Image: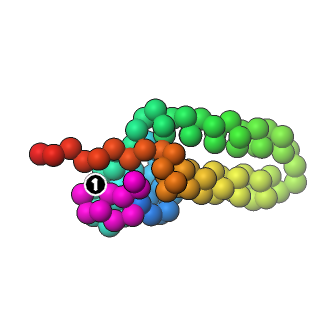
């Protein structure tokens, strides 16, 4: 389930891209906070961080490092995290009843 608990809209890529904290998302439709399971989000974020760190260290010092290596790697990491949310690897907690 990768939907907002309040308005039932799908979580968008821009919601993932615009957040400075991958554990706290906001719905792109209603701006309500979306709660993620810290365990599943932490495991996925840790794996992605390990992979991108390895890539960045391996290519460090190459010509055009920031444009040719860092930017595509970070965008790919955001895309992978979004895909993990959409596939259900990162669990979205249901909204608590008030």
Quadrant of the frame with the C terminus = top left
Percent x, y for residue 39? 46, 32
The residue drawn where x is 55% and y is 34% is 43
Answer left or right for 30 relative to 14: left
Viewer-proximal residue among 75 and 6: 6
Rendered position, 39 above or below 90 = above
Q: Residue at x 82, y 57 (%)?
A: 64
Res 38 quadrant in image: top left
Q: Is residue 10 visible?
A: yes
Residue 24 in view of the camera:
no
Query: Is residue 90 shown in magenta?
Result: no
* Quadrant in the rendering for residue 53: top right
The residue under the point 76% across, 38% down is 54
Q: Locate the N terminus and report the quarter of the image it occupies.
A: bottom left
Query: For mark 1, what is the residue?
Result: 5
Viewer-proximal residue among 75 and 36: 36
Magenta span: chief secondary structure: loop
Q: Along the line of sight, which residue is nearer the eye, 96 or 77?
A: 96
Q: How many marks?
A: 1
Say which of 74 and 85 sits in front: 85
Q: Is residue 2 magenta?
A: yes
Give the structural element (helix, strand or loop) at label 1.
loop
User: How far across and down, in percent of the image, does residue 30 sit?
Assistant: 27, 64
**Which residue occupies 84% across, 40% down?**
58
Colour style of the rendered protein structure: rainbow
Residue 85 drawn at (x, y percent): 49, 52
Residues rendered magenta in the picture: 1-10
- Where is residue 84? Give x, y as percent: 54, 50
Mark 1 crowdedness (10 Å alpha carbons): few <14, some 14-19, many ≥20: some
């Amino acid at each position: 389930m990768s939907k907002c608990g309040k308005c039932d809209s799908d979580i968008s890529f821009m919601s993932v891209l615009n957040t400075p904290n991958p554990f706290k998302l906001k719905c792109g439709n209603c701006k309500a906070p979306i709660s993620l399971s810290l365990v599943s989000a932490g495991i996925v974020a840790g794996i992605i961080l390990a992979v991108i760190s390895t890539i960045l260290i391996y290519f460090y010092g190459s010509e055009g490092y920031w444009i040719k290596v860092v930017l595509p790697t970070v965008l790919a990491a955001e895309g992978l995290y979004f895909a993990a949310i959409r596939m259900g690897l990162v669990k979205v907690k249901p909204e608590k009843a008030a």
